[in-house]
Image (cartoon, rainbow, N blue to C red):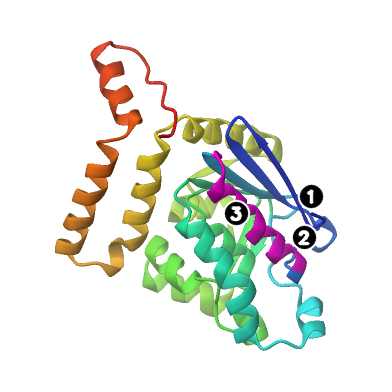
Amino acid sequence: MSTILKETKESVMYITLNRPDSLNAFNSEMLMELQTAFKEAGETSVRCVVLTGAGKGFCSGQDLKDFESEKKTFKEALEVKYNPLIRQIMGLQKPVICGINGVAAGAGLSLALACDFRIAVESAQLIEVFINVGLVPDSASTFTLPRIVGLAKSFQMCSTAERITGQEAKRLGLVNVCVQTPEVLKTALFKYSSKFAKAPTKALGMLKILLNNSFSKSLDEILDEEAVCQDIAGNTADYKEGVNSFIEKRKPAFKGN
């Protein structure tokens, strides 16, 4: 892989966008390599994924030169490259942590919003930049953003392309944790990925899907789905370990199954 870096350590897959000279802007190769990496994450014993960017930025969005050279329609590009990736991330029944080490703009912000847990440095810039080139947000931004910050703030961000700092993003709930420097970001990513990798993975995966579907389901549908998921969770080895550790007054050693 030439546009991303990927390694797995202690059940955590670390994916780094690796086009630092362009602030990790998306080209076709990167998008397809990301699809391959997330497919692997879903098919292996990986229990958590960490996604971040090399250099000074997380992802500045689509590389417009690359897009113009391909001569694809926007619809074709989204259906083949972006939408499958977003579905992979949001449908992956394992937690995905995003480390926003700098600018996250356009589809780069969409990518971050598709993740389950976001950590940003204070100086990060989160920007729904599409309107600046006469486009609408894509890659699920119009799905994820209103669920996080509400309709009014979503319209403001998308219609004005205002820059949201890491500190402001924490206040708005756009990110879960805000840290001072890229060095502290690395420490925080390790802390939370280690925590998630030691959690009951099956339950976390079902929790993720239940929450992602919650706005489009009725109360009765959610109650039914919770009951089905709880039955599955209650038959896992991790549930048995959780009960035993509680009775024995020790920390549980979940295995992810």
Type of amino acid under label 3:
Phe
Q: Do tag 2 and tag 1 residues touch (Cβ < 8 Å)?
A: yes
Label 3 vs label 2, nearer the camera: 3
Residue ID at (25%, 67%): 217
Type of amino acid under label 2:
Leu
Residue placed most toward the observer, 193 or 38: 38
Residue ID at (79%, 57%): 3
Q: Which mark, residue 23?
A: 2
Q: Which mark, residue 234?
A: none
Residue 253 screen position, x and y as percent: 42, 21
Graded by Cα atoms within 10 Å as few (under 14), some (14 to 19) or many (20 or more), the crowding at tag 3 reads some
Q: Identify the residue position indicated by label 1 in the image.
A: 55
Q: Identify the residue position indicated by label 3 in the image.
A: 38
Type of amino acid under label 1:
Gly
User: From the viewer's perspective, is 8 left or right of 173?
Assistant: right
Q: CA distance from mark 2 to mark 1?
A: 7 Å
Q: Is residue 27 visible?
A: no
- The answer to which quarter of the image holds residue 150 is bottom left
